[in-house]
Structures are given as structure tokens and as C-alpha cells.
Image (cartoon, rainbow, N blue to C red):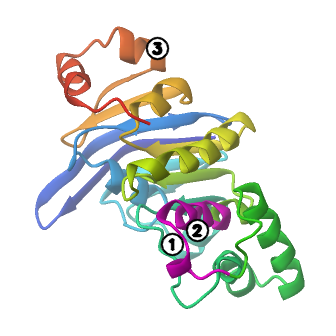
Amino acid sequence: MLEIKQIKKSFEGQEILKGVDLKVEKGDVVTILGPSGSGKTTLLRCINFLERADEGAMIFDRERLDLSSVQKRDMARIRRKTAFVFQNYNLFRNKTALQNVTEGLIVARRLPKDEAVGIGKRALDKVGLSDRYDYYPDQLSGGQQQRVGIARAIATDPEVILFDEPTSALDPELIGEVLEVMKQLAAEGMTMLVVTHEMKFARNVGTKVVFIDKGVVVEESAPREFFEAPRNERTRQFLGSVRWAG
């Protein structure tokens, strides 16, 4: 469904991604783990063209794209098949929860407002916010704001959702409500790439774990193998240092 080959990216002469390969099948929940600064977020942003890779190729639904020279029209077409959930929500502060979900449908996809509102309400219902349509971000908890972000993503009916550390900005007591929504999506067969520090989610919900360090994939395996019998010493060091919460 989605394959990345030898993706490279540098910022100001510093190589962040050093030739990353990644393959995602339909229905996969690929959790991407690694220390801060390892290139995890950069990888997601290159996949969704929020950053342009210096080198590498993407194969999406059998279409191959050169990531360093991809045209804007091709970017737009791929973006219509994906959705991005940001670490810090990225909501419009002056728009309600429902307006945040419908804005892209109306402006970017040019759906009639009535149709967009119907889709937006169903998406908010799905993430447990049927009583918060008219609330502004400042009236919502961090967990509720992130659930609005997830509703905005699923409203576009994407083939793949990219999650960039969706719980890292949340207070500990709010993490669970976001993870429950993600678990529900996974159970329904949504294809997901999730950059996360939530080890229990990676172990119990993920179908594949990818461990990235210093811009390279150090280890990739099924969750049980990854957590119970890691092959690489760097992986064992990482697992010994992380917080097992979530």
C-alpha cells in the first residue's frame, strides 16, 4: 500500500534521515519508536510533504514518486489519501470544534457546507465529542482538543493516518482517552503510522514496530518479538530506559 525507499533529509548540513526504508500494508498499525531527535517526526513530515525529502522514493497505491522532485499536483493527490494528527493539535483558536473539522472539507475539498457539517458531526461523534460541537479550543481539555484533531483527520476518509506523538503534549490523566480512540480506529482496520512514546500502545495495538535512532532504522519487527527478544543492543538499551505508561 505504502512504501518508502531510501529517504534522506538534512537541515542546515545536518543529516537527519540517512536512508530510511519503510513498508506499510493496508490495515497495519506501524508504531515508530526512538529517542528524541532520531528523525521520527521528520520521516512523517516527509511522507506527507510537510517537508521535502532530499532523496528517496515513495510508492503509494502502486504509483511511484521521486520525493526530491515531486510536483505540487502529485503532492496534493497523495495528501488527499492521507491525514496528519499533530502533536500540538493545530486547531484554529477562533473556530469551534465542528468548524475545525469542516474547514478543510469546505475550503480544500469544496464540499457543500451541509454535507461537510454532517460529516463533521459524525466524526466528532466517533471520538466521543457529540456534546462539544460548538465549543472553542480554549473551552476544551488537551485530550478533547486532540480528539478534535483526530476527528478532523478521519472526516477526510483517508487511506492512512499519520500520528506525530499525539499524546506527548497531554497531561498523564488525559492520555488514555486519546489512546482509546486510536485503539478503536485500529480495531476498525484503519491504516496508521504512529510516532509515539507509549510503549504499551506499541506492544498491544501495533502490528509492527520500527525503531529509529540517529536517522536510520535500527530494528523492525512484530511487537512481541521487538519487546521480548530485541536483536540489537541499541534497542535493548532504549527499552531499558523508557517509561512503560499508557
Along the horizontal axis of the image, is 215 left or right of 128?
left
Q: What residue type is labelled 1?
A: Gln
Q: Magenta stretch containing residue 87, yes or no?
A: no
Between disc 3 and disc 1, whose residue precedes? 1
Query: Which numbered tag is attached to residue 224?
Result: 3
Name the residue carrying label 2.
74
Label 1, label 2: how many angstroms apart (C-alpha)?
5 Å
Residue bearing mark 1: 71
Q: Which of marks 3 and 1 is in front?
A: 3
In the image shown, does 56 or 212 lie closer to the viewer?
212
Residue interval drawn in magenta: 135-152
Whether pointer 3 and pointer 2 mark residues with C-beta atoms closer than 8 Å, the reply is no
* Residue 148: x %, y % from top left: 61, 67
Q: Can residue 142 be seen in this view?
A: yes
- Distance (Cα) linking label 3 and label 1: 40 Å
Q: Is residue 95 above or below residue 169?
A: below
Residue 199 position in % (x across, y down): 39, 31
